Image (cartoon, rainbow, N blue to C red):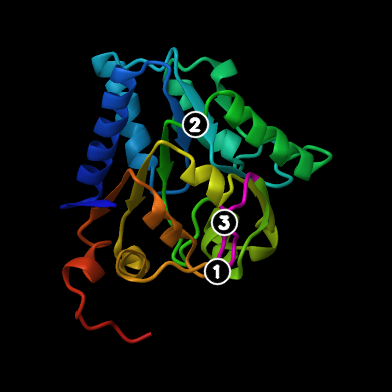
Amino acid sequence: MQVYVYDNYEALSIAAAKIVAEALKQNPALKLGFSTGSTPLGLYAELVRLHKSEGLSFSKAFGFNLDEYLGLPACDEQSYHFFMQEQLYRHIDIPPENSFIPDATAKDPTAEAARYEGLISAHGGIDLQILGVGTNGHIGFNEPGSPWDSPCRVADLAYDTLVANARFFDNDMEKVPKQAITMGIATILAAKRIIFMASGQAKAEIIGKILKGEQTLNIPATALQNHPDVALLLDKAAALDVLLPNRSRPPM
């Protein structure tokens, strides 16, 4: 795992976008794995800028979303369908038929997860996967305890994740979907390259554990230690436990 530390979130986002842009120039038919949440927002904004100002084209590229809340229709403002449209897809030239997100309203979610896994395989797998990380170490919605050989599947959200995501649902945990369809850890590890991003002091402790700790099912992101091509991009706040491992912690 190669670690890169940037002064701030903006610099981190620009650096991540440069990796994506260079990969697209080398392979216009790039299969990209996209994630959601606050971490990739700056990356997506920079990709939109590169498209509009510098002609970066996604016209032959493919996008595969990492996950989707179970039960939310695509038109729901908290669905990841909606997120991807608003933050990226409607601003660039990726063909609609080349962008894929699990159908979380499918009558048989388990079958839908298997279909999505097959779809990724049929396209030759993910060339470049973008990842964030939860404070409990989850990647996608692979929560602590998730098996590392898991394909796309229906996953239960951990309590920590429900608490963290409540801010998107009027701070009402009862409104947060309790399950999601997610790429499994095996699906993620099958990607040829991974951009792994973390920003802010809230992520510092888990980043320290991922980099310095042993592999454990209790921290799903430690599975990335097995991958041959991971670029971990951090801002200084997220890198505190790496740069200053003996720093004192604020009282809880």
Distance from the alpha carbon under mark 2 to that under mark 3: 25 Å
In the picture, the disc for residue 160 is: 1
Residue in the image at 74% along x and 45% along y? 71
In the picture of the structure, the residue carrying the numbered disc 3 is: 142
In the picture of the structure, the residue carrying the numbered disc 2 is: 86
Q: Nearer the viewer, mark 2 or mark 3?
A: 3
Instruction: Give the structural element (helix, strand or loop) at label 1.
Output: helix
Is residue 36 visible to the viewer in this orientation of the structure?
A: no
Residue type indicated by callout 3: Asn
Q: Is residue 144 magenta?
A: yes
Residue type indicated by callout 1: Asp
Instruction: Give the structural element (helix, strand or loop) at label 2.
Output: helix
Question: Nearer the N terminus, badge 1 or badge 2?
Answer: 2
Distance from the alpha carbon under mark 1 to that under mark 3: 13 Å
Is residue 157 visible to the viewer in this orientation of the structure?
A: yes
Rendered position, 68 above or below 115: below
Locate residue 6, reporting x and y percent.
Answer: 18, 50
Magenta range is 141-152
Q: Nearer the viewer, mark 1 or mark 2?
A: 1
